[in-house]
Image (cartoon, grey):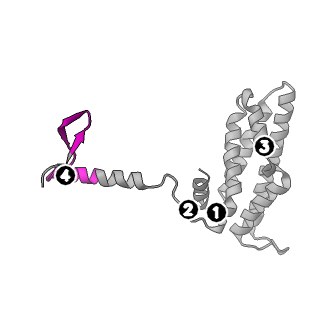
């Protein structure tokens, strides 16, 4: 069989070898080629078959990602307007916020309590955590609005940003990690 020649347009009289015909070099080449072709043919974002729970989880994970970003943004005064714009999005309005978190709580713990019955323990804990995140987020937004208009000490701003992000981490800690990871992957 031999080697497969490839012509170089700049040196048309000279052929370049592409694949060795046998031996360990051929094996290495074939393994490398297989890996490269798999990598090149693999989509950058795999198609996700999301569960209903993961779909419901998306808005909450989006809020989690934003709170982490806001925690960083508030450290620089030049980023305060950007952080405030994120917090002024409709998803942070109390009714929308509660709805997104309630859907997660209801789907995670089952529908007990959703129809007026007694909520399960997991739901109660999730609702309490949701309320803490909501309170910390409202405090953070109010502090940002105040500081943008008035020069003042930023200690409370940092405290609110940290506590909102920490409360969100605690909330997500109640949920299955694999589900959160899938939702985060879908948001990329």
Q: CA distance from mark 3 to mark 1?
A: 23 Å
Mark 1 surroundings within 10 Å by alpha-carbon count, few (fewer than 14), some (14 through 19), many (20 or more): many
Give the number of the disc on residue 87: 3
Please tell me how many numbered marks the rendered image carries: 4
Closer to the camera in the image, 21 or 93: 21
Counting residues from the start of the chain, the first of labels 4 and 2 encountered is 4
**Occupied quadrant, residue 123:** bottom right
Q: Which residue is label 2 attached to?
A: 48
x, y percentage for residue 99? Answer: 80, 60
Residue 13 counted in the magenta span: yes
Counting residues from the start of the chain, the first of labels 3 and 1 encountered is 1
Closer to the camera in the image, 113 or 181: 181
Q: CA distance from mark 1 to mark 2?
A: 10 Å
Q: CA distance from mark 4 to mark 2?
A: 36 Å
Q: Which residue is label 4 attached to?
A: 26
Q: Nearer the viewer, mark 1 or mark 4?
A: 4
Q: Which residue is label 1 attached to?
A: 54
Counting residues from the start of the chain, the first of labels 1 and 2 encountered is 2
**On screen, 79 above or below 87?**
above
Counting residues from the start of the chain, the first of labels 3 and 2 encountered is 2
Q: Helix, strand, or loop for circle 3?
A: helix
Q: Helix, strand, or loop for circle 2?
A: loop
Looking at the image, do the residues carrying marks 3 and 1 touch, with CB atoms under 8 Å apart? no
Closer to the camera in the image, 54 or 12: 12
Q: Quadrant of the N terminus?
A: bottom left
Looking at the image, do the residues carrying marks 1 and 2 touch, with CB atoms under 8 Å apart? yes
**Occupied quadrant, residue 68:** top right
Counting residues from the start of the chain, the first of labels 1 and 4 encountered is 4
Which region is colored magenta?
A: 6-32
């Amino acid at each position: 069989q031999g080697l497969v020649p490839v012509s170089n347009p700049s040196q048309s009289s000279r052929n370049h070898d592409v694949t060795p015909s046998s031996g360990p070099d051929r094996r290495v080449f074939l393994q490398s080629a297989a890996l490269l072709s798999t990598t090149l043919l693999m989509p950058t974002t795999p198609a996700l078959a999301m569960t209903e729970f993961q779909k419901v989880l998306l808005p909450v994970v989006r809020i989690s990602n934003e709170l982490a970003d806001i925690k960083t943004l508030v450290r620089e005064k030049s980023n305060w307007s950007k952080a405030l714009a994120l917090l002024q999005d409709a998803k942070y309005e109390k009714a929308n916020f509660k709805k997104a978190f309630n859907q997660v709580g209801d789907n995670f713990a089952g529908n007990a309590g959703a129809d007026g019955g007694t909520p399960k323990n997991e739901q109660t804990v999730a609702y309490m955590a949701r309320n803490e995140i909501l309170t910390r987020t409202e405090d953070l937004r109010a502090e940002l609005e105040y500081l943008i208009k008035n020069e003042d000490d930023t200690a409370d701003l940092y405290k609110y940003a940290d506590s909102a992000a920490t409360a969100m981490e605690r909330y997500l800690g109640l949920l299955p990690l694999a589900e959160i990871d899938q939702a985060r992957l879908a948001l990329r």
